[in-house]
Image (cartoon, rainbow, N blue to C red):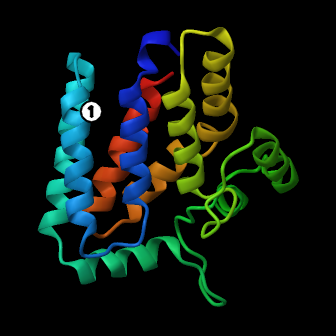
Amino acid sequence: MIYNQITPLASLILRFYAKCFTFPYEEMNYELQHQYRVIEREAVTEEETNHVDQILTIINYYQGAEIKDLRDDYVNLFTSNQDVKAPCPMIASEFLSMYASHYDPDKISDSIWESGIPINPDEPIDSILNYLEYLSLLCQEYSESEEKYFNVELFLKEHILIWIPQFCEALYKVAQVEFYREVAAGLKNYLFSLQ
């Protein structure tokens, strides 16, 4: 990870991706557009502009989809019930139990509690929303101090990269609505750019 990649823009971009994993609702389109405008103003480098362009593509796919199709795909992708497991659970422990042989649920839960993540009470502790929001918070608080840099790098390596890129690959393969495919591609690309 390079120091200058952890900027206030990183915090804004991560919040945008977290918002994409909320259940679709009518006003979400306007909220995503507002986030885009704020992000666009902050982009300076060519690489940042490329990420902003990806975000605009994601918003265009959201706008072009029917809200019913977005909601149906959301439920089909991310929701488990007694009979069927979600193909892309947004919860690290569920996802890793399906896709990783090295999965240790106790270690993940302990690490999350020890990290001090401000938990969204409506989400499981290890949901992708909590992970992205916390990384966003770390980036927002980032300064040139070595300690802050270490916190961002450590959380990225120990909590984000162990499952979210693989989650994005699975999501890209099974999503029916192009919006979720673009979110998956954009998020994976952005997380790798932070390394």
Question: Which of 121/189 is in front?
Answer: 121
Q: Is residue 24 above or below residue 7?
A: below
From the top left corner, tell me how far across and down residue 51 is, in percent.
27, 33
Q: Residue at x 29, y 74 (%)?
A: 70
Q: Is residue 16 above or below residue 121?
A: above
Place residue 190 in its image quadrant.
Answer: top left
Place residue 43 in its image quadrant.
Answer: top left
Instruction: Give the residue furthest to the bottom.
Output: 83
> In the visual, does 40 lie left or right of 132?
left
Q: Residue at x 22, y 18 (%)?
A: 44
Q: What SS does tag 1 mark? A: helix
> In the visual, does 142 lie left or right of 50?
right
> In the visual, does 6 lie left or right of 108?
left
Number of marks in the image? 1
From the top left corner, tell me how far across and down residue 160 is, in percent.
60, 40
Q: Is residue 34 above or below residue 29?
A: above
Q: Amino acid at mark 1?
A: His
Question: Which of 38/70 is in front?
Answer: 38
> In the visual, does 88 lie left or right of 37?
right
Disc 1 crowd, CA 10 A, few/some/many (<14, 14-19, 20+): many
From the top left corner, tell me how far across and down residue 23 is, in percent.
41, 72
**Which residue bears the numbered disc 1?**
51
From the top left corner, tell me how far across and down residue 182 is, in percent.
28, 51
Q: Residue at x 67, y 25 (%)?
A: 151
Q: Residue at x 27, y 24 (%)?
A: 48
Question: Which of 102/33 is in front?
Answer: 33
